[in-house]
Amino acid sequence: MSYNNIGDTYSKLGSVEKAIDYLNQSLVLFTEIGQKNGIKESYVSLYKLYDKKGDYQQALKYHKLFSDIKDSLLNEQSGKQIAEMDAKYESEEKEKNIELLTKDKALQQADLNKQKFIRNGFIAGLIITLLLAIILYNRFSIKKKLFTTLTSANNELIQKNTLIEKQKEKIIDSITYAQHIQQSILIEESEIQKILPDSFVYYQPKDIVSGDFYWCSKIEDKIILAAIDCTGHGVPGAFMSMIGNTLLNQIVNEKHITMPSEILRQLNIGIYQALHQEKEETLSRDGMDIALCSIDYKNDQLEYAGAQNPLYIVSNNELTVAKADRQTIGGGGMISKKENPLKREYTNHVIPIKKNMCIYLFSDGYMDQFRGSDRKKFGIQQFKDLILANQSLSMQKQKEVMVIEHENWKENAHQIDDILIIGLRL
């Protein structure tokens, strides 16, 4: 029967050959044990399967076999019914004679049983009443003890919840204060617009503090601009953003390094050293992805280097992508002869600046957002289409469109990651 059921299941799934295989195994076993009803079921299933397959010759064969065994079973059943009727007739005659002989005795016994029933019923009633009284008293005692226990547990739970709420408030207050510290290290959007007038920064953390951050500085005749996505979000990501911000200040503002690929190389070494990631036993495997540009208006050229995060360039209403290197900044890992993360090199792209050329630096939070209704991601292509569709707008208007599009897309879903997009028209 199991083989037969498996065969029927494969038939429903459309796996015809597997279904035939299991039904034939079922037929062999039913035939060996002489189980005619089982053989009949196998014939029916094989007939339907071959009919479904379009093999009408085999279907006719098994339909005929089914009809033959069905007739055989009907004949056997008819013979059994006749034998049963004969036996039943003889049995009824015997029962009538026995009934006449025992009728009087039964009447006498009925009177005795009636008296016995009344007596036993009275005794049983007393016993049941006594048991009910014992059970009710016991249940009352249990309920009383349970009520006392629950009251004590409830009071303890209230105290613990109060303590947890106080601890939660302290943690939130602490993280909120950390948010003020993190925001204080980020340059205001208005400050960036003083050196890059037609620009925007769309920065929306998932939690109170963020693992994404942006960085901007003007050194000599060059403007250095970066969008950074640290490992994780929330508090762990915020810690990494503080480290990244400090290292960028040292590399660019103190050492005056302005070549993007060299900045990334120095930043990678700085992360490894700061978190001691060169050690095999290190607990930290954190790092960051980054898109970093150096804008040189004096020579009309843009330099870019990226770790995982690309740069989008729009000129003459065409979008091109400056690809990032497929390696992160930091990230841990034992230093070996095969790969020494401290010696990572990053590609430096040099791009001529054209009139009204726009560039976009970003993390992956915007594209990875799920839609509430069907859990579909916004995606890279839709992000590109959104940028191209709004090229005629100012950068601030483009930012407004991106914010509205994000809210409409996620519907009632939660934001899943930090969002950071920087756009500017050169």
Image (cartoon, rainbow, N blue to C red):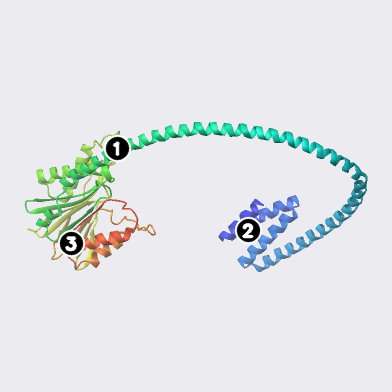
Query: Where is residue 33 shown, x and y percent of the image?
Result: 74, 50
What residue is drawn where x is 50% and y is 32%? Answer: 144
What residue is drawn where x is 21% and y is 47%? Answer: 345
Q: Nearer the viewer, mark 2 or mark 3?
A: 3
Mark positioned earlier in the residue sequence (1 or 3): 1
Amino acid on which disc 1 is placed: Lys
Residue 311 in which image quadrant: bottom left
Q: For the residues marked 2 and 3, what is the alpha-carbon distance in whole angstroms?
A: 67 Å
| Lateral position of residue 268 relative to residue 194, left or right | right
Residue 372 in which image quadrant: bottom left
Depicted 248 relative to depicted 52: above or below: above
Q: Which residue is mark 1?
A: 166
Q: Which residue is mark 2?
A: 20
- Mark number, residue 234: none
- Mark number, residue 396: 3
Mark positioned earlier in the residue sequence (1 or 2): 2
Q: Is residue 378 in view? A: no
Mark positioned earlier in the residue sequence (2 or 3): 2
Query: Where is residue 378 shown, x and y percent of the image?
Result: 32, 59
Q: For the residues marked 1 and 2, what is the alpha-carbon distance in whole angstroms?
A: 68 Å
Query: Where is residue 288 shown, x and y percent of the image?
Result: 25, 46
